[in-house]
C-alpha cells in the first residue's frame, strides 16, 4: 500500500512559526509532525509515501531525505507556488500512487490512530476516520451511522473528519462533475477541494467510516501546538 501526506499548505494561522518552517515540519515531542505519520505508516507496511509540497517546499528534503531512515521511499511532489487544495493535490499525486487504494493523511495533524484499521468495503470509494468534535469545531462535518458516512442532515449528530482516509483512485475519475466550474478548476493542474467528491460518493452510499476515540489533534494554532508538545514530553 502507498500513502499520500498533504503538506502543501501555507499555515496562515501558525504564523510567525510558519514563516520559516512548513507546518508539517513543526516539532512536537521531539519530532516533526510529519515524522510521526511516516513512522506509523512504515509500521503497517507502507513503503512508498508521496508528500505534496508548495510553501517552503525546499525544507522537506533536508529533514526527510529519501525516506530510508524510516524504512520508506519518500516522493516529494511540488505543486507550484499555489497549493492545489486537497482534491487537486490528490489528483496531481495519482501517477505516483498507482491503481490500488491508498491512505491519505493531513500533515498538520497528530494522532495515535492505527492506520492498519483502515479497510475498504468492495463497493466503497473511500473510508474516512472521524473523531469527536474538538472545541474549535463544535458542529462537526459528517454523520456516521452503522459504519456508513453521510453528509449532515438536519439535526443529525455529526463528527469531525480527522483528515485521515483510505481512497480508491476511481474517486477522482469524475472530479469535474462533482466540483463544477469553481475558480481553479480550469488551471493546469486543476485546483479544487476533496469534500465535493466525498459528498457525491456519500450520496450514493459509497463512503464508509470509523470512529476514532483515541488521541487526535488538529495543530491549527501555536497554542494547540504547544499543548500537544507538552503532552508528548
Image: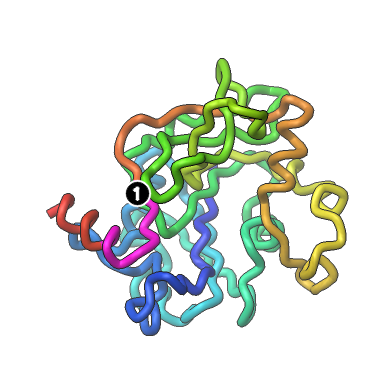
Q: Residue 36 placed where, x, y %?
A: 32, 53
Closer to the camera, 57 or 101? 57
Residue plotted at (37% across, 84% down): 20
Q: Position of 227 compared to 98: left or right?
A: left
Q: Residue 128 placed where, x, y %?
A: 55, 36
Identify residue for label 1.
217
Residue 17, above or below 110 = below
Q: Residue 74 placed where, x, y %?
A: 47, 62
Q: Which colour assignment does the render follow?
A: rainbow
The image quarter containing residue 31 is: bottom left
Residue plotted at (52% across, 59% down): 6
Task: Examine the structure image and report whether residue 231 is included in the region drawn in magenta.
Answer: no
Residue plotted at (77% across, 38% down): 200
- Does any portion of residue 20 appear in the rendered image? yes
Q: Callout 1: 10 Å neighbours few (<14), some, many (20+)? A: some
Q: Position of 226 compared to 103: left or right?
A: left
What segment carries the magenta color?
217-225
The image quarter containing residue 148 is: top right
Task: Examine the structure image and report whether residue 220 is included in the region drawn in magenta.
Answer: yes
Closer to the camera, 216 or 59? 216
Residue that protrudes farthest toward the left in the picture: 233
- Does any portion of residue 31 appear in the rendered image? no
Q: How many marks?
A: 1
Residue 5, above or below 205 = below
Dot 1 lies on which element?
Answer: strand
Q: Residue 140 placed where, x, y %?
A: 51, 40
Amino acid at each position: 500500500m502507498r500513502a499520500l501526506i498533504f503538506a502543501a499548505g501555507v499555515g496562515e494561522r501558525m504564523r510567525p512559526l510558519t514563516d520559516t518552517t512548513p507546518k508539517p515540519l513543526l516539532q512536537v515531542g521531539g519530532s516533526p509532525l510529519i515524522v510521526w505519520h511516516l513512522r506509523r505508516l512504515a509500521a503497517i507496511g507502507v513503503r512508498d509515501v508521496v508528500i505534496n509540497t508548495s510553501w517552503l517546499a525546499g525544507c522537506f528534503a533536508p529533514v526527510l531525505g529519501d525516506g530510508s531512515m524510516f524504512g520508506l521511499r519518500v516522493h516529494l511532489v511540488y505543486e507550484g507556488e499555489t497549493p492545489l487544495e486537497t482534491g487537486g493535490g490528490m489528483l496531481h499525486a495519482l501517477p505516483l500512487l498507482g491503481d490500488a487504494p491508498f491512505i491519505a493523511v493531513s500533515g498538520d495533524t497528530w494522532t495515535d490512530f492505527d492506520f492498519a484499521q483502515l479497510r475498504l468495503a468492495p463497493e466503497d470509494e473511500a473510508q474516512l476516520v472521524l473523531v469527536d468534535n474538538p472545541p474549535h469545531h463544535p458542529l462537526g462535518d459528517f454523520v456516521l451511522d452503522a459504519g456508513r458516512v453521510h453528509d449532515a442532515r438536519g439535526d443529525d449528530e455529526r463528527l469531525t473528519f480527522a483528515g485521515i482516509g483510505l481512497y480508491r483512485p476511481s474517486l477522482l475519475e469524475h472530479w469535474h462533475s462533482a466540483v463544477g466550474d469553481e475558480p481553479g478548476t480550469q488551471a493546469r493542474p486543476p485546483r479544487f477541494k476533496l469534500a465535493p467528491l466525498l459528498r457525491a460518493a456519500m450520496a450514493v452510499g459509497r463512503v464508509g467510516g470509523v470512529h476514532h476515540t483515541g488521541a487526535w489533534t488538529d495543530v491549527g494554532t501555536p497554542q494547540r501546538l504547544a499543548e500537544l508538545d507538552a503532552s508528548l514530553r
